[in-house]
Image (tube, rainbow, N blue to C red):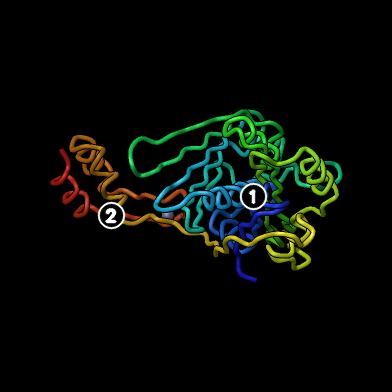
């Protein structure tokens, strides 16, 4: 099954719901970053949450989410567009921490700290809003973020199943957002439904589509608004790295040329390497100030 999400209204149009299957894009992230199980689960949950959040916007907007915890995973970053493209990385890809039950201990691996959400609307300034990490399990942290920073009462479910050999078995998620005018009894009903819901990673492993997950949440009663394909997509290029090197300035580039004769750069998001040799450096120096 390909990765995609659907957006719908449920509960008489008073709740906005997104459901997504992201197994392939998380498997791609696992491969390029050599993620071990707990790092894979943490980044996979973040990528899923981020790509769903991207679908809340339109046009050329970009969203960058930083999870800065003090756990062994270190910082995590994910960036998305409103077109179903996401990329991300973790400081430490090699974390495999479990609870006694054998369940991956994402919370402790992420630790305490803050979530920072930066919206680049491509018109003027960027906006960043932040909230405190609650459990480090990612879903609870973003439910808190939506409620606290965006004043939208929300429920978030995210799940990644990873085999001991690091293979991604399933990944998916949902975000529910309660809109003004939603009745108290509807909220109670939603809370009850979410509490009894099968974990989303289990649903995806059983082959549930985003529509099937939506059916579980709304009891087959929703209005479909949008369907969107999802991909792991990096926007890096040699030109972007050239610009970055030029911005270091003439003096520093001349020092690199003198001492190392070359420079090797690597994209954090996709691990593509861009090498610049002596000739390339001389060209860059000509363009630098
Ligand atoms: Zn890249």
Residue under the image location 45 percent in, 40 percent down: 119
Residue 233 on image: x %, y %:
47, 59
Q: Quadrant of the N terminus?
A: bottom right
Q: CA distance from mark 1 to mark 2?
A: 40 Å
In the depicted view, which residue is nearer to us: 60 or 163? Answer: 60
Residue at the image position 71 percent from the left and 48 percent from the top: 157
Q: Secondary structure at mark 2?
A: helix
Q: Position of residue 136 (x, y in %)?
A: 68, 36
Point out residue 155 in the picture as x, y percentages from the top left corner: 70, 43
Residue that badge 1 annotates: 16
- Camera-nearest label, 1 or 2: 1
Q: Of callouts 1 and 2, which one flags the residue occurring earlier in the amino acid sequence? A: 1
Which image quarter: residue 192? Answer: top right
For mark 2, does the 10 Å Cα neighbourhood hold few (<14), some (14 to 19), or many (20 or more) residues? Answer: few
The image quadrant where one finds the C terminus is top left
Between 85 and 251, the one nearer to me in the picture:
85
The residue shown at (79%, 53%) is: 199
The mark found on residue 25 in the picture is none
Please state if 125 lies on the left or on the right of 67 as rendered: left
Q: Is residue 226 left or right of residue 171?
A: left
Residue appearing at x 21%, y 54% in the figure: 280
Identify the residue under disc 2: 239
Q: Quadrant of residue 171?
A: bottom right
The front one of 151 and 24 is 151
């Amino acid at each position: 099954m390909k990765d995609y999400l659907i957006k719908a209204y449920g509960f008489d149009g008073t709740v906005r719901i997104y459901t997504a299957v992201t197994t392939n894009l998380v498997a791609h992230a696992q491969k390029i970053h050599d993620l071990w199980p707990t790092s894979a689960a943490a980044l996979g949950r973040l990528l899923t949450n981020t790509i769903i959040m991207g679908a809340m916007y339109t046009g050329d907007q970009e969203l960058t989410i930083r999870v800065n915890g003090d756990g062994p995973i270190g910082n995590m970053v994910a960036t998305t567009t409103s077109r179903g493209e996401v990329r991300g990385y973790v400081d430490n890809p090699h974390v495999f921490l479990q609870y006694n039950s054998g369940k991956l201990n994402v919370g402790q691996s992420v630790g305490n700290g803050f979530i920072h959400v930066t919206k680049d609307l491509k018109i003027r300034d960027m906006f960043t809003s932040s909230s405190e990490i609650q459990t480090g399990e990612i879903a609870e942290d973003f439910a808190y973020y939506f409620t606290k920073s965006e004043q939208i009462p929300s429920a978030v479910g995210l799940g990644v199943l990873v085999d001991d050999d690091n293979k991604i078995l399933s990944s998916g998620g949902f975000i529910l957002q309660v809109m003004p005018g939603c009745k108290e009894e509807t909220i109670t009903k939603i809370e009850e439904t979410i509490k009894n819901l099968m974990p989303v990673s289990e649903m995806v492993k059983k082959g549930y589509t985003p529509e099937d997950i939506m059916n579980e949440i709304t009891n087959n009663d929703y209005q479909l608004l949008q369907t969107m394909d999802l991909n792991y997509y990096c926007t890096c290029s040699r030109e972007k790295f050239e610009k970055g090197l030029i911005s270091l300035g003439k003096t520093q580039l001349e020092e690199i040329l003198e001492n190392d004769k070359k420079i090797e750069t690597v994209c954090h998001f996709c691990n593509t390497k861009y090498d610049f040799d002596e000739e390339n450096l001389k060209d860059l120096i000509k363009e630098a100030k």
